[in-house]
């Protein structure tokens, strides 16, 4: 069955440091992969998506992710963390008409 | 352009009761998906509606049911509420022709079952 696994339920970085949030997927077919962000008391906002075009995908707010088939990974990165990046981040894979989400990674940014 | 809206924002029910949650999709969007997000977990797909018909369903029992109206707004109904139904319920709409690669989420309804 297709699914995603997010490694690390909590990640803490200092402001200005590199952000790396890990996601591995399992899929028997080429996947469609997504990263969403959720701020407190809000719904999910799409950061970026991979739909079998370029393997390096650029999203909003300076985030990007690289699809690596050999590693079955789709890790999310940002070169320099900002305080406003503190939120919950979800990796997801599309399966037919539904999205299957990971358990989420809470990002904390320290001043 | 108005985004996806959901009502109510919060709701408290007791075990065994029934609840109806509402979602207004973004203008021009004809597909609505519903998700359940338990505390500390990722959203889980409940079902999707396209042009008033159910168009996919996740691993939820039949007491979870839905409707989509001609204006593409949608309802999620849950019968015989259980304590484990306490969660944030998210609605997401998608525009025509893009399938669910383009989903826009509402802020959610937080349901507490006592």
Image (cartoon, coloured by chain):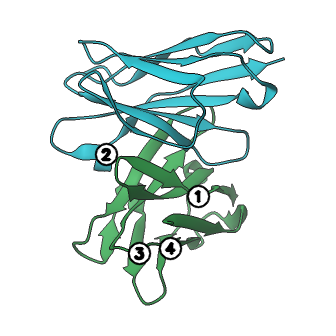
Looking at the picture, how far across and down is residue A30, in whole percent? 32, 73
Residues tagged 2 and 1 counted as in contact (Cβ below 8 A)? no
Between disc 1 and disc 3, the foreground one is: 3
| Neighbourhood count class around disc 2 (C-alpha, 10 Å): few under 14, some 14–19, many 20 upward | many
Is A20 located above or below residue A15 in the figure? below
Tell which subunit mark 1 falls on. A
Disc with the residue nearer the chain's start (1 vs 3): 3
| Residue for point 49% across, 78% down | A73
**Hue of chain A?**
green
Q: Is mark 1 on a helix, strand or loop?
A: loop
**Hue of chain B?**
cyan
Tell which subunit mark 2 falls on. B
Q: Residue A26 carries which label?
A: 4
Q: Distance between the residues labelled 1 and 4?
A: 12 Å
Q: How far apart are marks 2 and 1 (CA)?
A: 17 Å
Image quadrant in which the N terminus of chain B is located: top left
**Residue assigned mark 3:** A28
Residues tagged 2 and 3 counted as in contact (Cβ below 8 A)? no
Q: Is mark 2 on a helix, strand or loop?
A: helix
| Residue for point 73% across, 46% down | B40
Q: How far apart are marks 2 and 3 (CA)?
A: 19 Å
Q: Distance between the residues labelled 1 and 3?
A: 17 Å
Q: How far apart are marks 4 and 3 (CA)?
A: 7 Å
**Residue assigned mark 2:** B100
Q: Distance between the residues labelled 2 and 4?
A: 19 Å
- Depth check: give the residue in front, A24 or B76: B76
Looking at the picture, how far across and down is residue A17, in whole percent? 60, 72
- Depth check: give the residue in front, B110 or B80: B80
Is B24 located above or below residue B87 in the figure? above
């Amino acid at each position: 069955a297709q699914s995603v696994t997010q490694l690390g339920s909590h990640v803490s970085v200092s402001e200005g440091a590199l952000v790396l949030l890990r996601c591995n997927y399992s899929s028997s077919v080429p996947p469609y992969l997504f990263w969403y962000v959720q701020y407190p008391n809000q719904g999910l906002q799409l950061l970026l998506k991979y739909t079998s075009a370029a393997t390096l995908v650029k999203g909003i707010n300076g985030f990007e992710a690289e699809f690596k088939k050999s590693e079955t990974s789709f890790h999310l990165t940002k070169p320099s963390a900002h305080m406003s990046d503190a939120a919950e981040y979800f990796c997801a894979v599309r399966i037919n008409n539904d999205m299957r989400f990971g358990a989420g990674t809470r990002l904390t940014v320290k001043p | 352009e108005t985004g996806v809206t959901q009502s109510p924002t919060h709701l408290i029910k007791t075990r065994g009761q029934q609840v109806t949650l509402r979602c207004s999709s973004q203008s021009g969007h004809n597909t609505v998906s519903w998700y359940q997000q338990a505390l500390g977990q990722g959203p889980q797909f409940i079902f999707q509606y396209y042009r008033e018909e159910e168009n996919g369903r996740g691993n939820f029992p039949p007491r979870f049911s839905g409707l989509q109206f001609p204006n593409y707004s949608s309802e999620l109904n849950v019968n015989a509420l259980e304590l484990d139904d306490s969660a944030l319920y998210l609605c997401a709409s998608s525009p025509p022709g893009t399938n669910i690669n383009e989903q826009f989420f509402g802020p959610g309804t937080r349901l507490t079952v006592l």
